[in-house]
């Protein structure tokens, strides 16, 4: 073999070797690609399996939660709903007597509501101070029908279907057309002015809640709550036309009121507490029974904050005669009678 032929053979062998290497490289690359593709396919399949598994778990959880809600709802419809108050109202009204039928009829009366600590007041009250008024949802806890309902036979209503709103001459109206506190569920709704939010406490005015009233919830009053197209029946004017008795104080009563300002809980000056007394008494807080059985010599009394106010009705005015520190003497059933609500 000459040199030329030897070089050709060497070149041919080199080319074959290069081709073999290239072929092996491509084959290896293809195998790796197939392995990678297989791995990706397996991962996608595993991911899809997990997604389906989670979807089944979610559907199962939703179904279980739905069944639990239905079961709880059915039990509540049968046995009643149960709610914990968010707090108890500390009111200037120590009992029902003198409490306005509508809170804002007496704008100077005051109360405060301390929110339960486990409701995280610092967070849950955040933003409320920007509102001027709030809705207060509460329980008429002193209603006699609350206890009566517990002793009534099953299926029998503890309340009357028709009531006699005040100042309507005995006219009877369906209870759901009134704001009577004697309701199947003794729940009240009241609009109050929010004076300030201080820590866990709401300071309110224009309230119509008795001291110790359980409050279920508060909601801010917004412009959407005021409907200018609202219509009302003519008889409503008869019941809401509150009397406006002139209220005067004896000199002794004024001196006593000034002397007792330091014992007050919700007031810190004589002018505000005097205005509150005037607002309450000007609406004539006597019951029908008291009006029929009393004369100019009859002395009435009611509690406001830590005071006991005594007064008489004269022909053309109401005269406050004494203001003493409240000694927490239980009022008689007549004195503490509830005049009803519309």
Image (cartoon, rainbow, N blue to C red):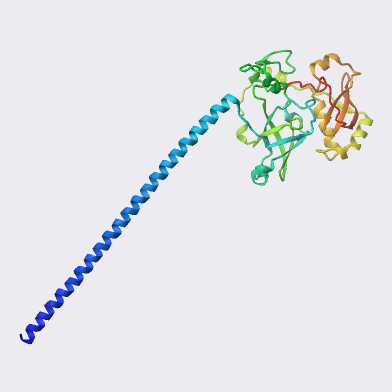
Q: Is residue 246 left or right of residue 192?
A: right
Q: Residue at x 36, y 47 (%)?
A: 49
Q: Is residue 202 above or below residue 335?
A: below
Residue at the extreme bottom of the image, as rendered: 3
Question: Can residue 95 be seen at all in this image of the molecule?
Answer: yes
Displayed quadrant of residue 317: top right
Q: Quadrant of the N terminus?
A: bottom left
Question: In this view of the protein, which residue sits in the foreground, 37 or 142?
Answer: 37
Q: Residue at x 27, y 61 (%)?
A: 33
Q: Quadrant of the C terminus?
A: top right
Question: In this view of the protein, which residue sits in the foreground, 162 or 36?
Answer: 36
Total labels drawn: 0
Question: Can residue 342 be seen at all in this image of the molecule?
Answer: no
Estimate the x, y position of residue 231 in percent, counting from the top left.
62, 23
Estimate the x, y position of residue 318 in percent, counting from the top left.
87, 23
Question: In this view of the protein, which residue sits in the foreground, 59 or 313?
Answer: 59
Question: In this view of the protein, which residue sits in the foreground, 99 or 29?
Answer: 29
Q: Residue at x 57, y 24 (%)?
A: 78
Residue at the extreme right of the image, as rendered: 252
Q: Is residue 336 above or below residue 50?
A: above
Displayed quadrant of residue 17: bottom left
Estimate the x, y position of residue 131 in percent, counting from the top left.
67, 40
Displayed quadrant of residue 95: top right
Estimate the x, y position of residue 158 in percent, counting from the top left.
67, 18
Q: Is residue 44 left or right of residue 232?
A: left
């Amino acid at each position: 073999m000459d040199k030329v032929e030897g070089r050709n053979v060497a070149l041919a062998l080199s080319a074959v070797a290069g081709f073999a290497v290239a072929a092996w490289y491509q084959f290896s690359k293809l195998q790796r690609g197939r392995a990678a593709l297989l791995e990706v396919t397996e991962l996608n399949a595993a991911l899809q399996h997990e997604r389906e598994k989670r979807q089944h778990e979610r559907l199962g959880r939703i179904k279980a939660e739905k069944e639990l809600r239905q079961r709880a709802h059915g039990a509540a419809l049968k046995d009643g709903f149960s709610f914990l108050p968010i707090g108890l109202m500390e009111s200037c009204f120590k009992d029902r007597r003198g409490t306005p039928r509508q809170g804002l009829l007496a704008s100077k009366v005051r109360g405060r509501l301390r929110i339960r600590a486990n409701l995280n007041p610092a967070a849950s009250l955040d933003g409320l101070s920007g509102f001027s008024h709030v809705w207060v949802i509460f329980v008429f806890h002193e209603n006699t029908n609350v206890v009566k309902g517990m002793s009534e036979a099953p299926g029998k209503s503890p309340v009357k279907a028709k009531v006699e709103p005040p100042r309507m001459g005995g006219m009877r109206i369906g209870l759901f057309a009134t704001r009577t506190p004697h309701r199947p569920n003794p729940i009240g709704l009241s609009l109050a002015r929010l004076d300030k939010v201080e820590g866990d406490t709401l300071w309110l005015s224009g309230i119509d809640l008795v001291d110790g009233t359980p409050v279920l919830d508060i909601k801010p009053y917004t412009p959407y709550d005021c409907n200018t197209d609202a219509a009302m029946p003519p008889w409503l004017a008869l019941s809401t036309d509150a009397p406006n008795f002139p209220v005067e104080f004896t000199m002794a009563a004024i001196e006593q009121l000034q002397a007792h300002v330091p014992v007050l809980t919700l007031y810190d000056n004589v002018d505000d507490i005097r205005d509150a007394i005037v607002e309450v008494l000007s609406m004539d807080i006597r019951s029908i029974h008291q009006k029929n059985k009393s004369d100019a010599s009859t002395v009435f009394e009611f509690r406001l904050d830590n005071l006991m106010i005594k007064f008489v009705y004269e022909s053309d005015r109401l005269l406050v005669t004494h203001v003493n520190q409240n000694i927490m003497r239980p009022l008689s059933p007549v004195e503490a009678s509830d005049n009803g609500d519309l």
